[in-house]
Image: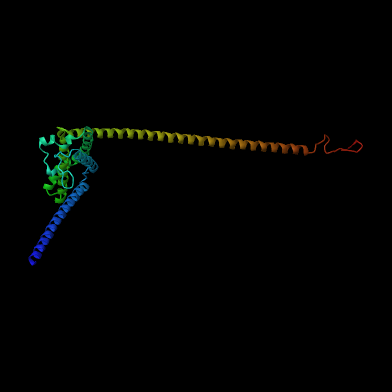
Amino acid sequence: MFDLVIDVLIVVVCLVILGGAAGYMLWSEWKSQKSSTGFFQEAELRLGYPVPRNEIRYYDKIRTDAMRKFQRENPEYTEVPINEFGEEDETLSDTDEPDEFTTSWLRQLSPEEKRLMRTGLMKRAIANLPRYQEIQKDYPGKEALYRRRLISEHHWQLIRAAYKDLVDEINFIQKEAECLEDGWGQRIFPQAYQLWRANLLREAQQKEVEKRQKQKEKEAEKLKKQKEHEEKIKQQKLEKEQRLAEKKAAALIKAEEEAKCQASSKSSSAKAAPKSGGGGNHSSKTKPNGKKES
């Protein structure tokens, strides 16, 4: 009985140790992935190499949906590597061999599904070109600065991390393209570059058209304001002339009234003044009987 208890305790202790070890490994892996993710995010923020997350997530989603649908419709097909979480696991299959490209489950998709996948993958390739150009331009110079110890180790590791992430992304896109169509892996980025340049040219032309349109609108608005200002000045001038004319008319009317008043006053004064006779100071008076008295 005592030996049985000891055996049970030993088994329990072993299980605890194994569980603890497994938990520690999972925690270490999670911490490592979190640290790696944080490192890439820091590289993106500090170095200015934006990762096209929207395009990456979009393609990953349609790829996962297509893979799961294909697996449901073709349960006998064994070329789709699935891990214990029900997700595709690239570590379970090496698709770098040419014969495995031709037998990839992506080649077995319907034309409509392939079209959707090709469109999503091309958008993903185009979205990576801006950071590809930036890293390609910066990397040699940064490497030379690092060798001369003019930038810190941490800064150089950020650059290397961004470079490695870009290389992994390019390899993934080329591999996916080859799985979708024979030979497309080598053509996808030249095609993406042409489309990207065409988009940039179209955007530049559109901006130029918008700039000219805004300039025309600005000039039209300027002419409109100038015309309104001239009309306002003209109206003010007319109003001023009208006020002057009214003022002159009022002055004339007043002058005429004053002249009339003066003439009327003189006439009244003339009528009220006595008349002088021919014999000096003799004055004649009229008697009541009509005879004059001298």
Above or below 83: residue 199: above
Report whether 279 appears left or right of 150: right
Q: Nearer the viewer, residue 237 or 172?
A: 172
Residue drawn at x 14%, y 34% is 186
Residue drawn at x 43%, y 34% is 224
Task: Name the spot of residue 174 as percent of width and height, x first.
Answer: 16, 37
Task: Name the spot of residue 194 as percent of width and height, x first.
Answer: 21, 32
Direction right: furthest residue: 289
Kindly indicate the quadrant of the structure image that contains residue 294: top right
Residue drawn at x 45%, y 33% is 227
Question: How many callouts does the rendering have?
Answer: 0
Q: Nearer the viewer, residue 38 or 290?
A: 38
Answer yes or no: is residue 189 visible: no
Answer yes or no: is residue 267 visible: yes
Task: Name the spot of residue 106 as percent of width and height, x first.
Answer: 17, 36
Report whether 249 appears left or right of 37: right
